[in-house]
Image (tube, coloured by chain):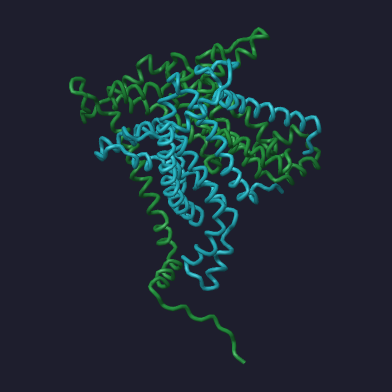
Chain colours: A green, B cyan
Amino acid sequence: MTHATVPRPRETPARRASVFLSTHPRTRLALLLSAPLFWLGIVYIVALVLLLVTAFWSVDSFTGEITQEWTLDNITTVLTGSLYQTVTLRTLGVALAVTLIDVLLALPIAFFMAKVATPRMQRILVIAVLTPLWASYLVKAYAWRSVLSQDGILEWLLAPFGGSTPGYGLPATIITLSYLWLPYVILPIYAGLERVPDSLLEASADLGGRSWPTIRLVVFPLVLPAIIAGTIFSFALSLGDYITVNIVGGANQMLGNLVYTNVGAANNLPLASAIALIPIVIIFGYLFLVRRTGALDNL
Amino acid sequence: MRLSRLSRTTLGIVTGAILLVVYVPLFVVLVNSFSTSTSLTWPPPGFTLEWWGRAFQSAGAMEAVATSVQIAIVATIISLALGTLISLALQRFEFFGREAISLLIILPIALPGIITGIALNNFFRTIMGVPLSIWTVVIAHATFCIVTVFNNVIARLRRQGTNLEEASADLGAGVWTTFRLVTFPQLRSALLAGGLLAFALSFDEIIVTTFTAGSGVTTLPIFILNNMFRPNQAPIVSVIAVVLVLVSIIPIYIAQRLSGSGVERR
């Protein structure tokens, strides 16, 4: 009677490499990380750092060439110029308003999708939320331009009730940006709510918790990281936007417009970089604040 | 927690109302693509099929679609490879700097597009001396598409654990064999979902694209931006938008079916 044995694998180079890799986890890690880190490091980090460095250079007003000498002029201009302060506050206000509106709209819809809808309904709703993501950003902004215009659908709907369209301006910008980023806020919150086990809600009910205390004391703390993850999208995307405000914002400028004009028409990349530092600092501050909540794992 | 019938109904109505508002502008675009007015007047003075015919004969629009598809495909392939590698590294290993790397991955989409845009523009033109072309767009897009693949793959890896991979190693399979026969098949639907999102992200991107595209490179969003304010082209832009939304429902439906097991409740 013979015992069946697993044949010994042949000693090919590939086999030896595989054995080496399975006994050397650090090498495995290094191989996994090398390509992506090379890409992100070279393409992204180097580019960002050089952009920051450029903010400390200046442009020769005569030749239009960049002078590579250290100067704080651009930073001083941006920090003290009243134009930049006004635009920064306006941009921050718009970004906060958009984020607040999106969270308020996303919470009920995400809750309905995750905890109330039947599985079939849930699938339909996910598609309903995702589909607008595929429509072009520009077309959506342009659609709002026509919705909000003086002879648009909003005026047509509101006129019989004595209302009128807000027209183009900051309110229009806030509406359009909230509309554009809403799916990005709904999806993380929905995913976060999906991860809350129904058994916790049942336990809360068994212990006498009514709907509202359960939502406030059980669901909300568990979903908070996901909510913050959603706000990162709406907040950061609004801070840098300049196309929407061009389309529906009337004459208003946001930080992105100032950066854009300085790169393009004014050809002053150092000043543009200095202006771009404002949203960078704000966003890093925000990411740093929310890091401890675990929001970054929910993106 | 047992929601009362009233609160369930209220939530349902609120959800329905929000979705309605979400679809009204898209509906306006649909109607405008048939409108005889070129200035997006509401209600439309009349209806015509002229724009639909013109859109499909517009060489510029067709070329822009082709350019966008090419860029999105290459950027998606690169981000699939890099995203899978990095999620394996971050999910299967504990090491110093892990947090920093996960921050690095989300940075390209967490920072406003205009910053990524001028940083890359400055990097390509001033620092590297490379002329902007279709490839600079691909590189830029792949950079911010990594995160969508990463999110999907790492979520899958977290859920499936390492038991099957260990069993495979115990049975004598090498590192590569285990990946090919055990890990990869489990990741397949996550890769498809992440890849579709990456494709969508690249296809629709305008800000970074504006700063990294060479003068001859017209992606679909650039084409739309160039044409939307021209009176005779605006309805054609509406036609393109309608087609894009209709076409996109199919891949989203497929992705949804494939990752359906992850969405099932309880």
B43 and A275: which one is in front? Answer: B43
A134 and A277: which one is in front? Answer: A134
Q: Position of residue B13 (x, y in %)?
A: 73, 28
What residue sits 42% from the left and 61% below the top?
A26
Residue A88 visible within the image: no
Q: Is residue A40 above or below residue A149?
A: below
**Residue B25 located left or right of residue A211:** left
Image quarter where the N terminus of chain B lies is top right
A111 and B25: which one is in front? Answer: B25
Q: Is residue A62 above or below residue A160?
A: below
- Total number of numbered labels? 0
Which of the 4 image quarters holds residue B64?
top left
Q: Position of residue B109 (x, y in %)?
A: 46, 37
What residue sits 48% from the left and 44% below the top?
B147
Q: Position of residue A262 (x, y in %)?
A: 32, 23
Q: Position of residue A298 (x, y in %)?
A: 56, 42
What residue sits 65% from the left and 27% below the top?
B20
